Amino acid sequence: MEKFTTLTAIAAPLPLANVDTDKIIPARFLKTIHRSGLGVHLFDTLRYDADGGERADFVLNREPYRRAQILIAHENFGCGSSREHAPWALLDFGIRAVIAPDFADIFYNNCFKNGILPIRLPRAVIDTLIGDASQGDNARLTIDLARQVVVRPSGEEISFAVDPFRKHSLLNGLDDIGQTLRHEARITSFEEARRAAQPWLPAIAPV
Amino acid sequence: MRIKEKRMSGAKPRTLFDKIWDAHVVERLPDGTCILYIDRHLVQEVTSPQAFEGLRAAGRGVRRPEATIAVVDHNVPTSDRRAGISEEESRIQVETLERNVAEFGVPYFPLLDERQGIVHVIGPEQGIILPGMTVVCGDSHTSTHGALGALAFGIGTSEVEHVLATQTLLQQPAQNMLIEVSGRLPPGTTAKDLILAIIGRIGTAGGTGHVIEYAGEAVRELDMAGRMTVCNMSIEAGARAGLIAPDETTFAWIAGRPYAPRGENFARACTYWRSLASDPGAPFDKVVRLNASEIAPMVTWGTSPETVAPITGTVPDPKAEPDDAKRAQLSRMLAYMGLAPGQKLAEVAIDVVFIGSCTNGRIEDIRAAAAIAKGRRVAANVRALVVPGSGLVKKQAEAEGLDRVFLDAGFEWREPGCSMCLGMNPDKLAPGQRSASTSNRNFEGRQGPGGRTHLVSPAMAAAAAITGRLADVREFL
């Protein structure tokens, strides 16, 4: 996983609530067995018309937002499916941070596993940032994860919260599995105790 | 006795969620993140290939294959499958899973096995899911299994890999939410209507960060299929999981299933399962109360499951919405759905009916739809599909003659899978087509690009198939 430390980039405004994972990446594009290559299908129905042409009114089809690395949206971003194809598609497009009032839980979690930083900020702050993001080439925000601040084009700093564990993993690009396996002895003793206490737990027969 | 009293007066009362959580914490990290032990991992073809690839790249194996079960459901055609899958990408995904389960030794129900079906139908059906377990799957509707009193939630592919490698997950505890439903559901009103009414009330983000426990008379009265329908759509309310305390209905349903414990073991298990119910006075962070007797058959009119109304209702007018952003979004929804403000829902004509999915693809759902279809005919110009949730559901329905009921009425009787719930296989809506569907999501393009979805119960779907429009099933009773 790529580290996330600081990012200064174009921010694209997407002032929609309940942007669901089918909207981020429709199910018909989930037939891949790879993680990469999904960026071209990101927001497929919002981005393209029925003939596959770009919709001029969609933000990511306009300059400078084609180069956006930050996305700002309304409430409940990423609701719906658990498909990690949603953060994969965002990442493949180039998005490294999403800012919204709140996120659906699974999507929020999936972002951290892929080096994407989801930032929760109050709706009033989101409206201000959407104003900033609407300034075209000047729509640059800086995100400093170590200091937990978003820096507006004006230089004003806005603090955000993030779990210490997730922050640490993101700052250092750490693999969760490697971290968990450091506790393998505990997992083994837990399993043994559990087998003794609940002998009714069945094993599923092999193929 | 004294010990018991002492414990009761000394221990902090806990919820069902707290008890399952506490029983699975392997290690608590300094910031409160927990390494949570996972008892059951359900694997399907869409969200697993990259996870197995990750294991391979890191030289890791599957820690507990015997706690894992794989099946193909999302991609598979629901027509005759003996000749294989013709769509190349779908076939590759299925073949990739088959290679992975063979390489890593994971138990698997192949496509032509009668136990194949939707992952959330087959798990409980086989007795693989039991009360008090932690259950995960790379699919948000894993919340279904909460109906058995198991803590079950959907995960992304990175977490699928994490569970395969470690049999654990890194998790922060959720908050507790109680939804208490008093009274009884009126005739013609089902578990589906109940959960749609709940989502309409609390919204699609109403449960975010929470595990919802459903309780109250109306929930206790539900059969296991109904409980699974309710818990299944917890994710549509934004909840991490849904839970219903295991009771005698649960135990009777589990008894005798292929992987369920037997004899002495079953009795011991029941004793433990009975202890899982939330303690009196256990604290909930959020409480919502509803009266089931006030609920009518429901239908969604928009492109979010919270946009729902009784079948006797009308399409709302965006002009009545004071917030600019919400008004614009509402107008967009109605334009997408091809509906006009004030239009009566019971007058909306439909093109397709889909009966099936992990929400409503169980034998009880098939029976409810068949009861309405029996002796009637599907309206002209309506295509109606019945897709059983598993091979065993299909077999049972055929043993009861329900396939004949549907076929005689002009429905299609198909092979099991996720099918038109998400249109990853050939079962899709064409652009502009409108469905009455027993599935769980009415998002834009969910059932096919440009398709328009109205979520309903199985009986309501059958009534829509017969009348050719969204219809009040109570007129058929």
Image: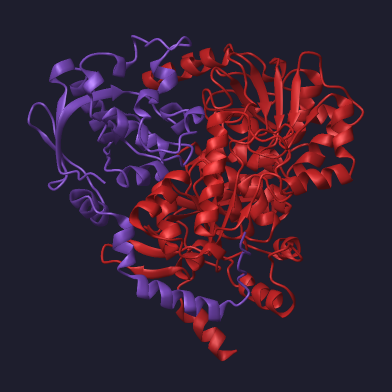
**Looking at the image, which residue is at 39% across and 54% down?**
B55
In the rendered view, would you say B75 is above or below B175?
above
Residue B345 in percent (x, y) is at 67, 19
Residue located farthest toward the bottom when viewing the structure as drawn: B2
Q: Nearer the viewer, residue B435 or B399?
A: B399
Q: Is residue A142 left or right of residue B366?
A: left
Which quadrant does the N terminus of chain B fall into? Answer: bottom right
Q: Quarter of the image holding residue B408?
A: top right
* Residue lying at 43% horizontally and 12% vertically, measured from the top left: A52
Side of B349 where B325 appears, left or right: left
Q: Residue furthest left?
A: A155
Q: Hue of chain B?
A: red
Could one spot residue B32 in this view of the protein?
Answer: no
Foreground residue, B164 or B298? B164
Position in image of residue B396 (x %, y %): 82, 47
Q: Residue at x 36, y 30 (%)?
A: A37
Whether residue B449 sits left or right of residue B186 in the image: it is left
Residue A40 rendering spot, x and y as whole percentages: 36, 23
Is residue A20 something that shows in the picture?
A: yes
Colour in which the image shows chain A: purple
Rendered location of residue B420, percent (x, y): 64, 30
Compared to residue B227, the image places residue B442 above or below, namely above
For the C terminus of chain B, which image quadrant?
A: top right
